[in-house]
Image (cartoon, grey):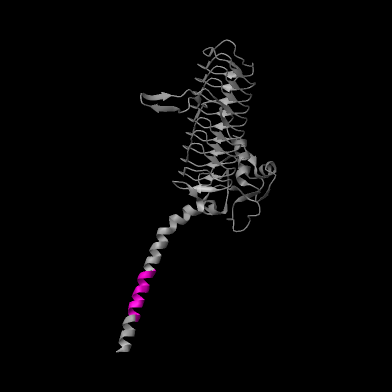
Amino acid sequence: MKTITVSELAKTLNSEFTGNGDFLIEGFNSLNDAKETEASFLAAEKFKAMLEKSQSKVILVPKGYKEHLPEGKIYIHCENPNMAFIKVVKLFAPPPPEYKAGIHPTAVIADGVTIPPSCHIGPFVVIEKGVVLGENTKVLSGCFIGEQTKIGKNCFIYSNCVIRERILIGNNVIIHPGVCIGSDGFGYEAGPFGIVKIPQVGIVKIEDDVEIGANCAIDRARFGMTWIKTGVKIDNLVQIAHNAVIGEFSLLIAQCGIAGSSKLGQGVIVAGQVGVSHGLKIGDGAKLGGQAGVTHDVPAGMAYMGTLAEPARDFMERMVLPKTVRKLKDRVVKLEETIKLLQEELSKSKK
């Protein structure tokens, strides 16, 4: 069992501590589930009630937050407890599985494929002609990589992914199980003799340091490219349609859908089950709240919510309006009653 003392951990985190520096930490956990010897963290003061109930003896807390802390615990004071706790997790987490370099004998590799010796190709992988892989890239079991696709170095492609022909993927990209990249965009033309399929002959380009969650679908462009820029992080079950552009370091959260030709700027946050309509522009740093239905452009830095989506302030005002109206109605009733009484008193005084 791996252990570390409080003082050693505080030194690793470049942080000060209060309490017994010789106390041994044997693991990590959430505030609710931690045992006495497992470290945990307090991300914000609003979780203080959980802190008081936690069995953990060692808590990472925000630097400067020293008042009203429950006694009997050891506190490590960090600039950012959440980020510091990532280092704690890495100290105690089990080592990741090892994937040795080499090609499994059941893999089917076409002629004219470039696979450096440092790559790992798992069982039942199919790689078509003209594919180029970068150094140290790992392709796990059951994946398919289509013709002329290029994948950079240090990529990790989990099992059962489909990466179709002519896709461009950069370096340090993580693709989780069940992802499909490069399927045809949803392009059809309705006519008098039925629905005609429009050829989808473009590509998908994925830049460096992108992570794509399980069972996502990213469609190829009609022509040109669907473009996922540097540092984008995509949650599970996200759909990105043909010719969409996702700006650098944007976050796309579960079950959201980005319709064709829409363009998201840098640092956009798209929450769960948001739908962005065709051809829209979402400005840098915009935030789209959960289940928002976005049907028009969103300016940079704005937060939109609701269906149909609107500025968050307008949405909140509309949500509280019924309560406000009820209160006003009650006031009107009381005022009417008061006026009636005054009229009765006035009528009596005239008599």
Quick check: 281 above or below 332?
A: above
Horizontal side of 8 relative to 68 (left or right) equals right
Instruction: State whether residue 97 appears in this view.
Output: no
**Which residue appears at 66% of the width and 54% of the height?**
64
**Which residue appears at 49% of the width and 46% of the height?**
289
Q: Nearer the viewer, residue 76 or 192?
A: 192
Instruction: State whether residue 187 appears in this view.
Output: yes
Horizontal side of 314 relative to 69 (left or right) equals left
Tell me the magenta residue range.
331-342
Q: Nearer the viewer, residue 224 or 99?
A: 224
Quick check: 268 above or below 47?
A: above
Q: Residue 227, image x and y in percent?
A: 57, 30
* Picture quarter with the C terminus: bottom left
Number of marks drawn: 0
Q: Residue 170, image x and y in percent?
A: 62, 26
Residue at the farthest front position? 192
Q: Main secondary structure of the magenta part?
A: helix
Residue at the farthest top position? 111
* Picture quarter with the N terminus: top right
Q: Nearer the viewer, residue 196 or 47?
A: 196
Q: Residue 169, image x and y in percent?
A: 59, 25
Residue 285 appears in which quarter of the rendering? top right
